[in-house]
Image (spheres, rainbow, N blue to C red):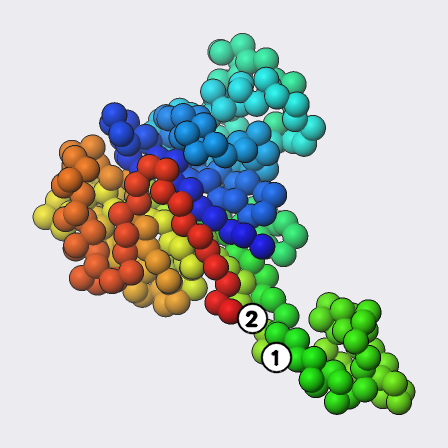
Amino acid sequence: MNLEAFILGCGGMMPLPHRHLTSVLLRREGDLFLFDAGEGTQVALRRLNLRWKKINAIFISHTHADHVTGLPGLLMLSSQVDRDEPLYIYGPPRVAEYVETSRKVLDMYINYEIVVKEVQAPAVCYEGDGFAVRAFPLRHTKTCYGYALEESPRPGAFHPEKANELGVPRGPLWSRLQAGDSVQASDGRTVRPEDVLGPTRKGRKFSYVTDSLYLPEIAPEVAGSDLFVCEGMFERELLPSAVEKKHMAAFQAATIAREAGGVKKLALIHYSPRYADQELRVLQDEAREIFPETVLSKDRMRFSLDYED
């Protein structure tokens, strides 16, 4: 089962000619999840040829303009296609007010159900087949949440030689063992799944954090992430400005990744517009001194989250 993350925009505060505002799309087989919807989200979706019509849910970190200005257009555009399923929107308090006010002021034609759910983090806000999305609090100038999509543990690897030794014939009984059910061997003995399966295997995890002061409490929320997307808005020299504006410097994002444990890759995002593209290297360099597996996210970049085995 494929799990892919697409960076739709990596900029903060204001869009630049080649840098849309912050937004990330996560694709898990047929399910699509959007994290924030900054200005330019529709353009990036179109340029990546993603099936945005099938977005299951949108997770909003907070209601500052650079994270939600792409949402009204996306909602209106969805009325131009056949959509049978509701669109779910999750976020902190006032996200429902923003959606409803936008619909009224813009006189939106909406021909599908929009379900807005305001979350009180920390909490599991969305559950699907074999995974869940958890919201957790950040500290910004207004209520702001981070999110983590984590898959359930997978059964251990099946060992056919053990099944044969225990007298379980190849066929439907093997499938039942792999599904976690006990079966009867040819001699009448009960064979349990643990008799033929290896240790439980970890599912995959994606975490998304933007617009927050550095908080040690973030680390356990993103621990074990295959991909941790985190704001790195400023370089170390500008830390006082970051603190004043309740943002993080890149080295602080790297500190969280290191402290969390089990993070495979850190992708920096939400850069200050003060940095031209060629100047972003300082953010990466400072982060890599602390967490070597750091990359600079760029618009339309794709990440594949793979199983460990």
Q: Nearer the viewer, residue 254 or 265?
A: 265
Which of the 4 image quarters holds residue 40? top left
In the image: residue 151, left or right of residue 7: right
Q: Nearer the viewer, residue 256 or 164?
A: 164
Vertical arrangement, residue 109 with respect to residue 8, above or below: above
In the image: residue 12, left or right of residue 82: left
Label 1, on which residue? 198
Task: Give the percent coordinates (x, y) of residue 227.
Answer: 40, 55
Task: Give the percent coordinates (x, y) of residue 112.
Answer: 65, 23
Q: Residue at x 44, y 52 (%)?
A: 304
Vertical arrangement, residue 218 with respect to residue 98, above or below: below
CA distance separating discs 2 and 1:
8 Å
Q: Disc 2, disc 1: CB below 8 Å? A: yes
Q: Residue at x 30, y 64 (%)?
A: 258
Label 2, on which residue? 201
Amino acid type of the residue tagged 1 in the rendering: Gly
Q: Residue at x 66, y 23 (%)?
A: 82
Q: Is residue 146 visible?
A: no
Vertical arrangement, residue 226 with respect to residue 103, above or below: below
Which of the 4 image quarters holds residue 193? bottom right
Which of the 4 image quarters holds residue 87? top right
Q: Residue at x 31, y 65 (%)?
A: 259
In the image: residue 220, left or right of residue 196: left
User: SS for tag 2?
Assistant: loop
Amino acid type of the residue tagged 2 in the rendering: Arg
Task: Give the percent coordinates (x, y) of residue 273.
Answer: 20, 32
User: SS for tag 1?
Assistant: loop
